[in-house]
Amino acid sequence: VSATPSQGTYDAATGLWTVGSLAPGATVTLQVTATVVTGGPKTNTAQVSAVDQFDVDSTPNNNVPAEDDQDAALVQPPRTLSKRAFLAR
């Protein structure tokens, strides 16, 4: 597993991405690369865990998916199919 933040630091041991200050309307990204060892879709969830200003419509780090400080993305690994033919001699 590796992770590359466009801003700030990422701690792989805790999964915590410290972004730092953001300008209004700014966008930052965290690119995570991992090897999936089980089949089926995976859900990646992210949430704002702390802020330095009051947010009128959400509470950081409370795990309420309906709030605007938390979101999730469904990742569907591509399917692979292999076929082998064994010919009798």
Image (cartoon, rainbow, N blue to C red):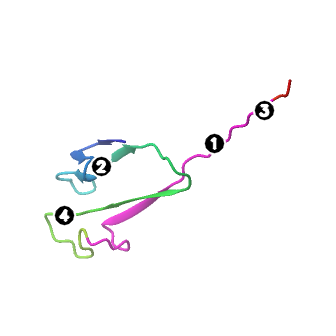
Callout 4 amino acid = Ala
Image coordinates of residue 76 in percent, x first then y, are 54, 53
State the quadrant of the N terminus. Answer: top left
Q: Label 1: which residue?
A: 80
Nearer mark to the viewer, of 2 and 3 = 3
Q: Label 3: which residue?
A: 85
Q: Label 2: which residue?
A: 28
Nearer mark to the viewer, of 3 and 1 = 3
Image coordinates of residue 37 in percent, x first then y, are 49, 47
80 magenta-colored:
yes
Of mark 3 and mark 4, the one earlier in the sequence is 4
Alpha carbons under labels 3 and 1: distance apart = 17 Å
Of mark 2 and mark 1, the one earlier in the sequence is 2
Q: Are marks 3 and 4 in contact (CB under 8 Å)?
A: no
Depicted 35 relative to depicted 20: above or below? above
Nearer mark to the viewer, of 3 and 4 = 3
The residue sitting at 21% across, 45% down in the picture is 9
- The magenta span reads 62-86
Q: What is the chief secondary structure element of the magenta stretch?
A: loop
Image coordinates of residue 38 in percent, x first then y, are 52, 51
